[in-house]
Amino acid sequence: MMRYLLLLITAGLLTAPAVHAQLRDPPEEVAGDEDPREVDSDWVIRLGAFGVITPKFEGSEDYKIRAFPLIDLEYKKRFFLNPVKGLGVWFWRGSQTKAGASVSYTNGRDEDDSNHLEGLGDVDGGVTANLYLDWEPRPWSVSLHYRRQMTGDDTGTLVDLRAGYGFRLVGPLFLKPSVRFKYADSDYNQSYFSVTPRQSVNSGLPAYDADSGVNGVGAGLLALVFLNKHWSLQALCNYERLVGDAGDSPIVQDKNQVRAGLGFSYQF
């Protein structure tokens, strides 16, 4: 059993960078603590696959379809590994609150992702440090995610605040609507939404200097269908509106961003 678990962990560590290389910002909902089934085991193991339709880049008017494996491991409700949160630990847990930290990989933005980005150059991805604070007075939940890239380009800090309400609609169908607010510092908005004078000459876009602030607000809906104690289906749809300096950037083609996905998982 332990040999099998070690193989899974190794596969997860090798898979995570490839996952993020395909999809820069996987939906937070595809892995984590959304499963309401009680598990009487030190290990929680979920394997599956997920496909999403997502903008080609933040602010794009064009969309792409991506698929990736889901490898979600948790040990003693403390250590975790999945392609969204990365490899980490919940270092404090209370009855309704928990705090944790992890390292993950965030892909940047390639100039050839879209013709609209030509002349802007690449934004290199890298290893990212994450801090999490979750408050779960069920059926409500509030989560705060702090993200800072440590290698590659200095893309600054992104803070993501979410609040949701989970409930059983009928039978095995669970729903969780949520709202979201994103704050980015000046380094992040400079990396993804500013246009330097040189980039302006190369791309034809007007020069633009994006400052820090709330750069996105949105709402989403997560649906979970538990077919039995092992198999489940998952669907999500998220809407985000780019606001502030991010929304006003000439890089942005459409302030309204939609992401939708469908997947399945098997829980051991």
Image (cartoon, helix red, strand yellow):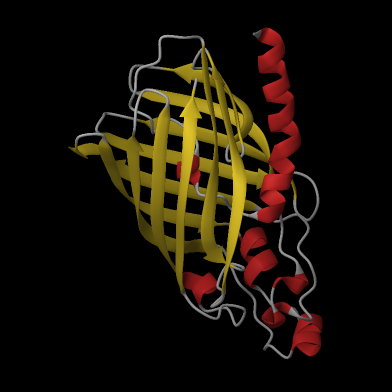
Q: Which percent across, then down, holds residue 164?
A: 31, 43
Front residue (pair 263, 257): 263
Looking at the image, residue 108 sits to the left or right of residue 219; the answer is right
Whether residue 166 is visible, yes or no, is no
Looking at the image, residue 108 sits to the left or right of residue 184; the answer is right
Front residue (pair 47, 100): 47
51 up-or-down from 240: above or below: above
The residue at the point 62 percent across, 65 percent down is: 189
- Pick out the residue farthest to the left: 170
Q: Which percent across, then down, holds residue 63?
A: 56, 71
Of the 4 image quadrants, the one containing the N terminus is top right
Looking at the image, residue 149 sits to the left or right of residue 81; the answer is right
The residue at the point 48 percent across, 35 percent down is: 265
240 up-or-down from 17: above or below: below
The residue at the point 59 percent across, 29 percent down is: 101
185 up-or-down from 18: above or below: below
Q: Which percent across, then down, holds residue 180?
A: 39, 53
Whether residue 22 is visible, yes or no, is yes
Front residue (pair 51, 136): 51
The quarter of the displayed image where residue 241 is located: bottom left
Front residue (pair 137, 49): 49
The residue at the point 65 percent across, 67 percent down is: 192
